[in-house]
Amino acid sequence: MPTQEASKLGNPGDATPPEPTPLQAGARIAIEAVEPEIECGRFAAKAVAGDDLEISADIFCDGTAVLGAALLYRAEGTTAWQTAPMSHWDNDRWRGTIPIPASAIGGMRFTIEAWMDGYATWRRDYQKKAAAGADVHLDLIEGGLLLKATLPHVTGSDRDQLQATLRGLDAGDSDRLLSADTQAIMTRCQERRHLSRYAHDVPVWIDRSKARYSTWYELFPRSQSGVPGRHGTFDDVIRRLPDIADLGFDVLYFPPIHPIGLTNRKGPNNNPKSKPGDPGSPYATGSAEGGHTAIHPELGTIEDFRRLVAAARERGLELALDFAIQCSPDHPWLKEHRDWFAWRPDGSLRYAENPPKKYEDIVNVEFYGKACPGSWQALRDVILFWIEQGVKIFRVDNPHTKPFPFWEWLITTIRERHPDAIFLSEAFTRPKVMKRLAKLGFTQSYTYFTWRETKQELTEYLTELSTAPVKHFFRPNFFANTPDINPKHLQAGGRPVFLIRAALAATLSSTYGIYSGFELCEATPIPGSEEYLHSEKYEIKTWDWNRPGNIRAYIKTLNRIRRENPALQDFAGLRFYNAFDGNILYFAKMTAKKDNVVLIAVNLDPHHAHACDFEIPLWEFGLPDDADMDAEDLLTGQRITWHGKIQHLHLDPADNPCAIWRLLR
């Protein structure tokens, strides 16, 4: 008896079954699990100009036919597809690479085609039969028919070769029918039977190289005068450029440089009451002097800023500006665009809040209701203004508190005019929110590295970030500290912990940053918090950049090692290996071709020396466990020859908590 569900479908014999559609009949080859592809193509994967972008997919079919596959790719705005071959790797997994020109910054799309390779299938089966001593007379005729069917699609020397092969076959010579030349011609020119194409085109965004590899230094321009009590200027920053460049940094990042409001201005240590002369928080943007496109008068003029941009460029430094959307109550927008802000039932202004915290010196911009689209367009124009002044890198303050659609629109709109713009997401928030911001366009992202301390924490977190799918859209920027975050480990570990965290940030991630004072091992906290005592956010500081105990030389060395080793300039190629001590993190960074391999071991304990055996990854190069391997100690310049897989190391944080070796193969 048929089931009730089957009866609903009717008796198969009651009616003539529908004919298969051409689409159903043609889609014989499955193309699945394409990588990189973010949410079925909803968002673009990330790549870098000048790289080879590796594409992989599961490609398979019924039966035993030999398949062929190719990548099709084109730049956004163009219609002509270019092709690149794919080859079978393992277990129906195929791979191919798209060569990205160094000048190809912007959008790109790719897709995959697969087909049954009639000649390759014939050639494989013929060789099996011949090897088994079977009669292959008819098989040779079938091979010749395949060539004859291809002749109308072949011209020039290829056609001449196929015709010569057929003449030889008629004369009893079958060798050319099986030659590599014939195989190559047939692969290019034969009919692609059951040609199938991936369901849609996959978007990729191609950034310039600084999106993947950069070294950030953050400072407050107002604290650069070197004279107690004197407000710093852009000219003071220009005088510091040689020193910052000499340390090996290539991005110089400023917190907001705009006029600071007077209403509810904060005093030292975030005191809600300020005194005359207190500079206030630069994040309280806007005063009678202007808003987000104005410069704080004590820093200088727009002409001074342009000189700074040019001077930095001459030193190999690119300026990054903070894009903090909140406003001081004195911001001109509150008078010009009242509807862009939230007002309470009693007519008072709704200040920014993170209950129970209140921030009376700032108010948030609204994005919907009467504020849309005006506030969106105004904020876009802020970015465009600073791009006109020579800035292409923006660190975005708290993007997770603004609407996702706004960021996707803003970044897309800016990229249409300036595809080389870079946006860093300062979102210390829930993991899924951080990843969503990266998907919808942010070039780089702050991370939880600042709080990851143990070997297990670092291994698990870095494995997550460096494997698919996260590695295709989330580019981590490892800041060791920020003006807002004075981590507990920095407060308690003394100078050794600064060496440890600098080594980890500089070698684990291809992009990292420090906030000035880190090189001086500054970590005096407000008791019981992760905030700095006498924070520079609320007062002008005077620094002695050469004070005793600093780690400037160590940071300079780390940055030099990064510049000299391409493996450290890419987040890919991270591998964790065995070091038999729970306090020693041991890993490698390597290029795709393994022509640059760097091994790093870091003692995570700032208070005690640790020693252990560790493994040289000889297996990565197909070498036996008793092979020799030469290496260079990049911190000392000493050359080493290791004999065998198991070696021993000793790391004392009081001296140097890490070892960095480059393998010499």
Image (spheres, rainbow, N blue to C red):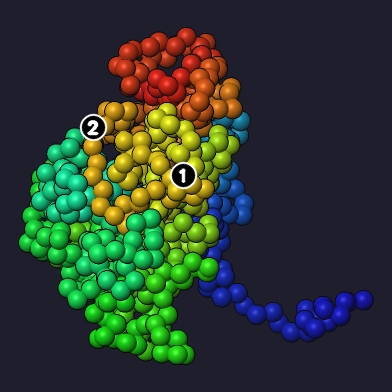
The picture places residue 621, in percent across and down from the top left corner, at: 45, 23
Residue picked out by circle 2: 546
Q: Amino acid at mark 2?
A: Asn
The picture places residue 219, in percent across and down from the top left corner, at: 26, 49
Q: Is residue 416 above or below residue 537?
A: below
- The residue at 29%/82% (across/down) is 334
Circle 1 crowding by C-alpha within 10 Å: few under 14, some 14–19, many from 20: some
The picture places residue 634, in percent across and down from the top left corner, at: 33, 22
Tell me which numbered mark, 1 or 2, is placed earlier along the sequence: 1
- The residue at 33%/12% (across/down) is 639
Q: Considering depth in this image, is 432 or 333 the residue closer to the camera?
A: 333
Horizontally, residue 580 falls left or right of residue 494, namely right
Question: Looking at the image, which residue sits at the far right?
Answer: 1
Q: Considering depth in this image, is 450 or 537 the residue closer to the camera?
A: 537
- Residue 640 visible somewhere in the drawing: yes
The residues tagged by marks 1 and 2 sit, at their Cα atoms, a distance apart of: 23 Å
Q: Amino acid at mark 1?
A: Pro
Residue picked out by circle 1: 487
On-image quarter of the C terminus: top left
Which structural element holds mark 2? loop
- The residue at 32%/13% (across/down) is 638
